[in-house]
Image (tube, rainbow, N blue to C red):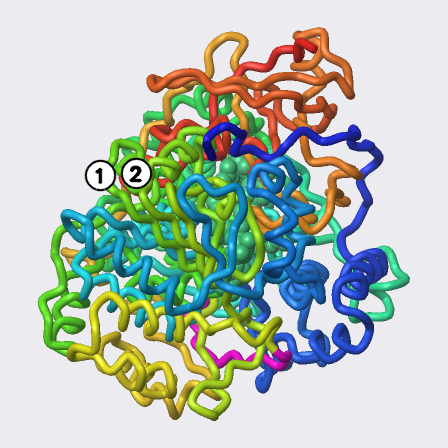
């Protein structure tokens, strides 16, 4: 009965209002906007005590993004969007058993994502029986018993998949992957598969590490910082303070982005008087309006120009000594670049030759250069080529393994990088599995597991029958919403460990369970003692996080306690002392130290925090040849034909992934609605569309046609042939088979679509 309703966010009652974009990011409006949301949800006392503990040494790690904390923290080390994330978690509203008794699953599915989030914190384990219309409360024992029964009834452990989102602590993640591997599978899909999978894949193959090679202090030394396919004003607001400091001392900031993102143009620091009152600091001095998917062509153009200039100047401009001693493959890259015709570069990048030459001049003048990137680079079919092109550019100047320079994939979720370090990955290196097995006296499975896309397919064709999620919102975050919904509905059981209600609780298997958990902001008392957890930021810094608030309800359990309870129910009390771990997280850290390199004296060092080793940063390239590798990439094929458009799915200012905090996208001038599509005026005219018209967007792939209905057209400064709409509303259009070559990451920034006026 539960497959009668749509898995997508419902239509919106009112159209969005479209106004002018502001001229700078942050400033006083950001403070008032976020404090209003915080006060509404938490009240004044809770707001103050919570916010003053965000990102402090004795407090909790902000659950929003993975941007690191500076050493000289201010009392208010949080940003507008951190406040929204904290308010959403620390809200006083409750989705308790009475709430679930009032609202049927079908009714909840007709509500907006904003409404679902505002329902408040989950307080009690809940169960949806086969054919039931409403969730009912269950005891923890009953819930674990049911999950254990379903898992044990599977024909093989590989018929279960265990998802992780990126807020899970190191301690919980380590135990979770241990439990899953003891159970007998490597089916550990995670949000990283949709996020920086391409970065890890691309970087490890050419520089021998899959993580960024810079630290915050390098931003103080760089003379150019490139921000490629990233919108930090919305998604990593604390990064703007770092960029402001750099811009003030004359560092060049280059933004490569189809959109002029306000946050990169001008910034008013909310913690400076001048930032509140003045006109702000200009940030990016060079804006490159690359076409969606045009980055490989653009970087080829930049490097071609650099080579030509270098040869004109007798080989004095590139880092030839570094190239000769530390890298392979330069000659092949050089030959390829010199042979690449300029008209193709300009046409496919969408960037004029003059701008390409200006960018090349910045690169050539940089003695220390940092390249940052995010989803605008990783969510493409040719994502790996994108990233390796950026690495090529850095290597030409010798910018890896030197202070003030390097590669900086900016992570999303606050502990997504740590979860990977802890072994949340469907194919961990043999060395890790070896040590894990030796430490816990078992033989971890060696068959590769399913990542996100493979898990969806496996559920769809019946190979996976039980789906378990430690956090996140799998249904709404994954591509191909209706296909994924059908996949989840084919499961015997779906389980969500969650803090807040979301659509993954509504689109379920035959039976479903919700397990409510503590959030980052909450006190975690186990075995009579207060516990802390640890996280790793985007720059490989590991540190403690300790909640300060009373838990949202007496029945909540920590993620660690949930994993231990589950393991006890499924595996019994065998060789692993799950209760011991649950009562004292220091014991978990002792075991992490023995399995994962870089965690020596973990318990002693956790409070103060420490960096994990990074070979490329230290000047060693742990590739097969011991050298960094230049790679050659052809400019990707143009897939969009006549009349097609290329759709990118992006975040608005009032959301954290699938959690919608509000209906505005202030920096893009949108108010009160999310079902919008940004279009170039010329593309609108070619289709006789006017601002405010409603259109249906359709995408085609080998596996069929998908349609997203009723998007409101917004005329916008975006390259011709490209359109943008918000995630998760537009996920229905991303075909499950549209993935990055090599990394299998959904290519949600380049979907070939058509747009037609909605028929009413
Ligand atoms: N407030 C808030 N903070 C967040 C999140 C959130 O949702 N809200 N999400 C968190 C997570 S998990 C992540 S991964 C990060 C995401 O952070 P971002 O990667 O900044 O997020 P997106 O909105 O997906 O933005 C992608 C940017 O890439 C650009 N872009 C799209 N296609 C292309 C292209 O082909 N080439 C280039 N050069 N640019 C392109 C878009 O115009 C946009 O500016 O943020 C994290 N922080
Ligand atoms: N089309 C399109 N799709 C995308 C993207 C895109 O740019 N475009 N971006 C992708 C990216 S980068 C990412 S990272 C994924 C995100 O995918 P997910 O991580 O799966 O999604 P979130 O929306 O971050 O998950 C929100 C839910 O997590 C739960 N939660 C919050 N805090 C906690 C906690 O502390 N513990 C537990 N157990 N649960 C918690 C809450 O119930 C909340 O509803 O989406 C991807 N999907
Ligand atoms: Mo992400």
Residue 52 is covered by the magenta coloring: no
The residue that disc 1 covers is 463
The answer for how far apart the CA atoms under marks 2 and 1 are is 6 Å
Q: Position of residue 734 (x, y in %)?
A: 46, 29
Residue occupying image coordinates x 79% and y 38%? 672
Circle 1: is it few (<14), some (14-19), or many (20+) Cα within 10 Å?
Answer: some
- Is residue 237 visible in the rendered image? The answer is no
Give the quarter of the image for residue 568: bottom left
Secondary structure at numbered mark 2: helix
Q: Which residue is mark 2?
A: 459
Magenta highlight range: 539-550
The vertical placement of 245 against 136, above or below, is below
| Above or below, comparing residue 461 to residue 613 in the picture | above
x then y, percent, for residue 654: 69, 49
Give the percent coordinates (x, y) of residue 127.
46, 54
Q: Residue at x 27, y 53 (%)?
A: 150
Name the image quarter holding residue 168: bottom left
Q: How many circles with numbers are drawn on the protein?
A: 2
**In the image, what residue occupies the spot 65% across and 28% down?**
718
Query: How dense is the environment of label 2, judged by Cα within 10 Å: few (below 14), some, or many (20 and up)?
Result: many
**Which of the two residues, 104 or 45, is positioned nearer the viewer here?**
104
Q: Are marks 2 and 1 in contact (CB under 8 Å)?
A: yes
Whether residue 647 appears in this view of the structure is yes
Kindly identify the residue that appears in the image at 47 percent across and 43 percent down: 132
Front residue of 76 and 549:
549
Q: Secondary structure at mark 1?
A: loop
């Amino acid at each position: 009965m539960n497959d009668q309703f749509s898995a997508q966010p419902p239509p919106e009652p009112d159209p969005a209002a479209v106004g002018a974009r502001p001229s700078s990011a942050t400033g006083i409006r950001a403070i008032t906007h976020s404090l209003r949301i915080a006060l509404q949800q938490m009240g004044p006392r809770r707001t103050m005590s919570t916010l003053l503990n965000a990102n402090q040494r004795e407090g909790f790690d902000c659950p929003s993004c993975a941007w690191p904390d500076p050493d000289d923290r201010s009392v208010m080390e949080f940003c507008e969007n951190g406040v929204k994330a904290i308010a959403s978690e620390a809200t006083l509203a409750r989705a308790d058993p009475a709430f679930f008794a009032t609202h049927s699953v079908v009714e909840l599915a007709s509500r907006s994502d904003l409404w679902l989030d505002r329902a408040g914190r989950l307080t009690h384990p809940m169960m949806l029986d086969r054919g039931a219309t409403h969730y009912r409360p269950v005891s923890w024992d009953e819930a674990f018993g049911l999950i254990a029964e379903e898992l044990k009834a599977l024909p093989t452990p590989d018929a279960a998949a265990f998802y992780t989102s990126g807020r899970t602590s190191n301690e919980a993640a380590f135990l979770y992957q241990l439990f899953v591997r003891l159970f007998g599978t490597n089916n550990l899909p995670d949000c990283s598969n949709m996020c920086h999978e391409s970065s890890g894949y691309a970087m490890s193959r050419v520089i021998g590490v899959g993580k960024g090679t810079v630290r915050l202090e390098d931003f103080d030394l760089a003379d150019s910082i490139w921000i490629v396919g990233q919108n930090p004003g919305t998604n990593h607001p604390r990064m703007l303070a770092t960029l402001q400091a750099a811009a003030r001392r004359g560092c060049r900031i280059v933004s490569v982005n189809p959109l002029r993102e306000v946050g990169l143009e001008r910034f008013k620091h909310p913690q400076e008087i001048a930032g509140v009152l003045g006109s702000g600091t200009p940030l990016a001095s060079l804006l490159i309006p690359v076409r969606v998917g045009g980055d490989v062509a653009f970087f080829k153009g930049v490097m071609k120009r650099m080579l030509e200039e270098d040869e004109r100047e007798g080989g004095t401009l590139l880092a030839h000594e570094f190239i000769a001693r530390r890298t392979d493959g330069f000659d092949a890259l050089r030959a390829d670049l010199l042979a690449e015709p300029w008209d193709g570069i300009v046409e496919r990048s969408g960037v004029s030759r003059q701008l390409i030459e200006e960018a090349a001049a910045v690169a050539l003048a940089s003695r220390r250069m940092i390249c940052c990137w995010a989803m605008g680079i990783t969510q493409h079919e040719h994502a790996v080529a994108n990233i390796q092109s950026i690495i090529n550019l850095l290597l030409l100047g010798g910018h890896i393994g030197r202070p003030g320079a390097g590669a900086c994939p900016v992570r999303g979720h606050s502990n997504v990088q740590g979860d990977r370090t802890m072994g949340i990955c469907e194919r961990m290196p043999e060395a890790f599995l070896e040590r894990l097995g030796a430490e816990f006296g078992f033989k971890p499975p060696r068959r590769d597991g399913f990542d996100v896309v493979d898990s969806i397919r496996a559920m769809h064709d019946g190979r996976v029958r039980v789906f378990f999620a430690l956090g996140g919102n799998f249904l709404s975050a994954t591509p191909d919403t209706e296909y994924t919904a059908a996949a989840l509905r084919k499961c015997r059981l779906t389980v969500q460990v969650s803090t807040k209600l979301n659509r993954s609780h509504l689109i379920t298997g035959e039976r479903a369970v919700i397990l409510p958990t503590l959030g980052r902001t909450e006190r975690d008392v186990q075995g009579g003692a207060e516990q802390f957890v640890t996280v790793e930021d985007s720059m490989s810094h590991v540190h403690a996080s300790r909640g300060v608030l009373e838990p949202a309800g007496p029945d909540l359990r920590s993620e660690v306690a949930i994993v231990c309870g589950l393991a006890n129910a499924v595996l019994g009390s065998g060789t692993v002392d799950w209760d011991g771990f649950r009562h004292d997280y220091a014991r978990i850290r002792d075991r992490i130290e023995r399995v994962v390199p870089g965690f020596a004296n973990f318990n002693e060092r956790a409070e103060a925090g420490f960096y994990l080793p990074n070979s490329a940063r230290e000047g060693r390239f742990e590739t097969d040849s011991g050298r960094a590798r230049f790679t050659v990439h052809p400019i990707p094929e143009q897939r969009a034909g006549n009349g097609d458009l290329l759709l990118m799915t992006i975040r608005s200012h009032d959301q954290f992934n699938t959690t919608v905090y509000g209906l505005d996208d202030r920096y893009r001038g949108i108010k009160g609605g999310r079902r919008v599509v940004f279009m170039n005026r010329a593309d609108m005219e070619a289709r006789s569309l006017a601002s405010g018209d409603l259109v249906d967007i359709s995408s085609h792939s080998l596996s069929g046609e998908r349609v997203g209905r009723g998007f409101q057209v917004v005329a916008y400064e975006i390259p011709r042939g490209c359109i943008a709409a918000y995630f998760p509303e537009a996920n229905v259009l991303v075909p499950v088979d549209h993935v990055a070559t090599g990394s299998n990451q959904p290519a949600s920034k380049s979907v070939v679509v058509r747009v037609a006026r909605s028929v009413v």
